[in-house]
Amino acid sequence: MKANLKEDIIIMLTVNGKTEIGPLPKNVGLERLRFDGQKVIDLFDLIDGIWVRSVNGVFELHAVEVKGSQKVAMHYIERKNLVMDGNTIRLKTTQEITNEKIKLYEKQVLSQLNRRLKGKLGDMTELTLNNTMLIMALIVYVRNQPSALSDFFDELIPHILDTFPLNKWKDTLKNACVELKDSMEEYHSNISKNI
């Protein structure tokens, strides 16, 4: 079997290929096969590590050392866990993989919540209008303290406490306030520089 190669990567099998690579294993795609100069190697079979190189943010896997590659103690099935750590290519830690799964799950749950709230409370314009009405009601209550609004807020308080228990939301709200403060300070600083 002949092939065109780029280093040890088999680009294409062809009758007019430049390199004789010998027989190929059955039922294995070229993406997993490399030619080390003597024989075809299945990256899946490598147990002492794989040579990895980052090319434009994409990891290339090699059976032999090539320019710019680093040997990573890994198995082929772990390739999706490769990451750049400064100039070092390594596998993500178990904690990093767990954190990514948690973040993905949180995004999925937030997306479900978003769809539900949109269906029940309306789109962003309606939600903004509802929030604005609530803020206006709070301003009137703080200023005038009418009994009708007092009764209305008394009805809402148990629902608010059940929806946003302090033990679950304290850190989130605190972090949001700190981030908002930092962002606004940066915003005002950038505005002042251009005035």
Image: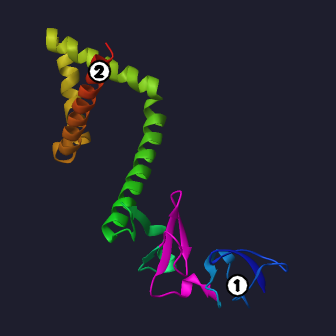
Which residues, given as a range, are shown in magenta?
Answer: 40-69
Q: What kind of colouring is applied to the model shown?
A: rainbow
Query: Which mark is on residue 134?
Result: 2
Q: Is residue 164 visible?
A: yes
Above or below, 51 against 130 in this view is below
- Left or right relative to 164: residue 82: right
In the image, what residue occupies the spot 63% across and 81% down? 34
Mark 1: which amino acid? Asn
Q: For residue 87: magenta?
A: no
Query: Which mark is on residue 39?
Result: none
- For numbered disc 1, what is the local secondary structure? loop
Above or below, 94 against 49 in this view is above
Q: Quadrant of residue 39?
A: bottom right
Q: For residue 58: magenta?
A: yes
Q: Nearer the viewer, residue 16 or 178?
A: 16
Q: Quadrant of residue 161?
A: top left
Label 1 belongs to which residue?
A: 27
Category of crowding for the residue at label 1, using alpha-carbon neighbours closer than 10 angstroms: few (below 14), some (14–19), many (at least 20):
few
Image position, residue 96 (x, y; %): 34, 64
Above or below, 86 against 91 in this view is above
- Residue farthest to the right? 15
Do residues under tags 2 and 1 come within 8 Å of each other at their CB atoms? no
Q: Nearer the viewer, residue 120 or 64?
A: 64
- For numbered disc 2, what is the local secondary structure? helix
* Figure quadrant of the N terminus: bottom right
Above or below, 83 against 111 in this view is below
Image position, residue 99 (x, y; %): 33, 61
Which badge, 2 or 1, comes first in the chain's sequence? 1
Q: Is residue 145 visible?
A: no
- Left or right relative to 141: residue 121: right
- Residue farthest to the top? 144
Category of crowding for the residue at label 2, using alpha-carbon neighbours closer than 10 angstroms: few (below 14), some (14–19), many (at least 20):
few
